Amino acid sequence: MNSISYWLYLCLILRASSACKNEKEDITVTKIIQNSGLNEGPHWDHQSQKLFFVDIFNQKIFSFDPATGTTRSVYIANGPVGVAIPVYNELNTFIVGTGTDFALVNWNSNEDNTSATVEVKATVDKGKTNTRWNDGKVDSSGRFWGGTMGPEINSVVTPNQGTFYSIDSDFIPKVQISPVSISNGLTWSLLDDTLYYIDSPTYQIAAYDYDPHSGGISNKRIIFDLQKNNIPGLPDGMTIDSDGNLWVAVYNGARVIQINPVTKELIRTVHLPTSKVTSVTFGGPLLDTLYVTTSGLGPIEMKNEAMYAGGIFAIKNLGVHGLLPNLFRTNV
């Protein structure tokens, strides 16, 4: 651990404040929302300037407006909500992975709602029991990519029960990788020729050659292994910055790591005051704020963690910018 990260770690753990400044790099880590569930899937919507994320087992989609500090939510009755992404050019419409359904959901994110209009367009993992959507994103062609995971019993996920899919505007799921255990973070390279993908229990970040036109992937290789780099925890959600470096949430690791996928080197570690870090995305008008989701479920493992577990955090002054996320297209 370098001196900067160590100072930030001590500051976050030992102080009662929810925000802490790094004197050398001026990095700030601030809890902006307290939500005790299993929060995942952060997505910055540039048009509305809002952050969207999901609370999986409470079956909710949330919106957060940084300008007003307002949080709104909607309940989805179909099952656990693993991912929600706005649909291009369709107001108040999202594609949502709920249970094993892939659905269109209509919701005005300026309102709190106890229900929403849900139109199921496809169902995956047919013939399997108790799997669910866990994470997903959209590629440059407007195509959805996401995966499922197996049932969890006593905090242990049944291995090799999930599948990684792509879904185009025809709403027909296409199997891309099978089996997987906990389908998680994914993003694409700046040249749009590489897909980076995480199956969490492997402790690895994999890269595939990627064709944005056909949606084909091939030539798997490993570009980073957490265990080999002595990083505790599991790789979870992931995003990429405008320099082409990956940012990875480390579940049970109390940190976010920045990785150069070309040199396969760890660039930087930013520690958080709670262990179960689930996902990351860049947001804000300049895409220079890293939003981080965490889980409030399970045992507390760190000093003072109770006041932070399940929080949504904003990390600022990292000196990097993200990219605009893609939106699902129904009319390609």
Image: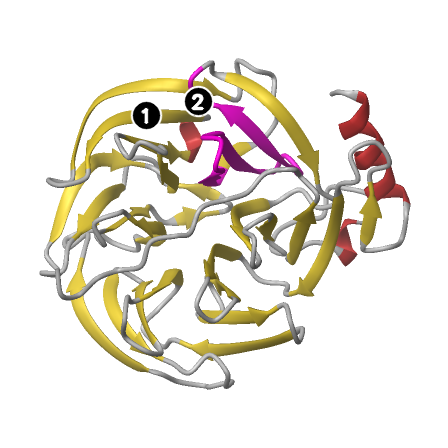
Taking the spot 34% from the left edge, 50% from the top edge, the residue there is 136
> Quarter of the image holding residue 275?
top right
The C terminus - image quarter: bottom left
Q: Nearer the viewer, mark 2 or mark 1?
A: 2
Q: Amino acid at mark 1?
A: Ala
Q: Nearer the viewer, residue 328 or 159?
A: 328
Q: Amino acid at mark 2?
A: Pro
Q: CA distance from mark 2 to mark 1?
A: 9 Å
Reply above or below: 233 against 285.
Answer: above
Q: Are marks 2 and 1 in contact (CB under 8 Å)?
A: yes
Please say which color scheme the image uses. secondary structure
Q: Which residue is mark 2?
A: 261
Task: Name the outermost residue toward the front.
Answer: 286
Residue 184 screen position, x and y as percent:
39, 42
Instruction: Name the spot of residue 22 as percent of width and height, x first.
Output: 82, 38
User: Which mark identifies residue 295?
Assistant: none
Q: Label for residue 207? A: 1
Residue 61 lies, in percent from the top left, at 45, 70
Question: For residue 142: magenta?
Answer: no
Res 182 visible: no
SS label for mark 1: strand
